[in-house]
């Protein structure tokens, strides 16, 4: 499976604890190679082969709302 970079908009993060919770949830996913969570912009950039639906589910399981930012995939398939 090819590696790609996805950017998610994440609603509900208000503090560094929120940022850390989202980061940890995403980095635990099989296939995730790199995670960067931006509290100020309410987004996360994830590189790897994990599915987008798994990424969204991981964020939502932490209590936040996630959606893909259109045209964020660097290697569309």
Image (spheres, rainbow, N blue to C red):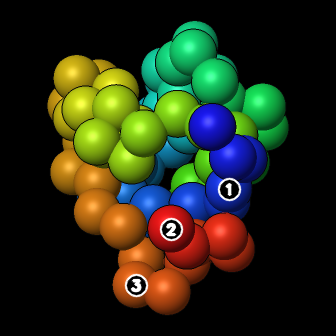
First in sequence, mark 3 or 1: give its number.
1
**76 left or right, relative to 63:** right
Observer-side mark, 3 or 1, equals 1
Q: CA distance from mark 1 to mark 2?
A: 9 Å
**9 left or right, relative to 29:** left
Q: CA distance from mark 3 to mark 2?
A: 14 Å
**Image point (41%, 77%), residue name:** 69
**18 left or right, relative to 31:** left
Q: CA distance from mark 3 to mark 1?
A: 14 Å
Q: Position of residue 6 (x, y in %)?
A: 57, 61
Quickly name the residue at label 2.
77
Q: Residues within 10 Å of mark 2 (few under 14, many from 20)?
A: few
Quickly name the residue at label 3.
70
- Determine the image quadrant of residue 70: bottom left
Quickly name the residue at label 1.
4
Q: Is residue 71 above or below residue 66?
A: below
């Amino acid at each position: 499976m090819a590696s790609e970079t996805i950017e998610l908009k994440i609603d509900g993060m208000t503090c560094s604890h929120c940022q850390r919770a989202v980061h940890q949830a995403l980095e635990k996913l099989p296939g995730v190679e790199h995670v960067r969570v931006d509290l100020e912009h309410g987004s996360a950039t994830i590189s790897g082969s994990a599915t987008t639906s798994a990424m969204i589910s991981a964020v939502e399981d932490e209590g936040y709302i996630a959606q893909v930012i259109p045209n964020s995939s660097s290697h569309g398939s």
